[in-house]
Image (cartoon, rainbow, N blue to C red):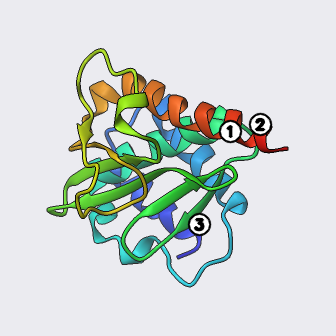
Amino acid sequence: MKHKEFFPLISSIGRLSKSQHQTLTYCLDTTERMQATQYSYEQHSALEDASVFELFMLCKQEIFAMDGCVTEKINQRYIAFKAKSNFVDIFFKYSKELHLCLNMRFHDLKDRRSMAKDFTGKDHTGNGDVIIPNLKQRDVPYVISLVRQSLDRQMKHQANDD
């Protein structure tokens, strides 16, 4: 699905403020940073729900704002955000729940609110040992700080490898 096809969905939300609408428009305009893939947002039916779509786009905007090297790749089971490799994957469950998987070890995460769950050695969607389940809009700023830890860790390791 091309990003222009999302504009009718944004318009149908109706209750968004002007700044929220601008934020979503900005996120849609970043799609040129996406890598070519055979999958699209259409494979993720949870995004048909306006509240899930809005939450996803808010996360996407915040993730892209972290660094200019961040790209997005839509996979069959999750949407990956990458620097050198995936540092966070977003996936959906029960059609209205947005979950994040951080590509780092659980014991390396500094999570003062204990929102993250340790999935070390467990079968799950995404890459990494850390799952942040059922994200709520009120928690986005804090959760983005956790995502930042994953990106920073990857960038630090990448710098050490160079």
Residue 77, compared with residue 125, is above or below; it is below
> Residue tagged by mark 1?
157
In the displayed orientation, state which residue is furthest to the top. 112
Q: Which residue type does callout 1 highlight? A: His
Disc with the residue nearer the chain's start (3 vs 1): 3
Percent across and percent down for residue 44 are 35, 70
> Residue tagged by mark 3?
4
Percent across and percent down for residue 47 are 33, 62
- Give how far apart the Cα atoms at labels 2 and 3 are: 40 Å
Residue 110, compared with residue 61, is above or below; it is above
Q: Are marks 2 and 1 in contact (CB under 8 Å)?
A: yes
Observer-nearest residue: 18 or 119? Answer: 119
- Give how far apart the Cα atoms at labels 2 and 1 are: 5 Å
Q: Is residue 158 left or right of residue 125?
A: right
Percent across and percent down for residue 144 are 45, 30
- Give how far apart the Cα atoms at labels 3 and 1 are: 37 Å
- Does residue 144 appear in this view? yes
**Residue at (23, 58) in percent of width and height:** 122
- Mark 1: few/some/many CA within 10 Å (<14, 14-19, 20+): few
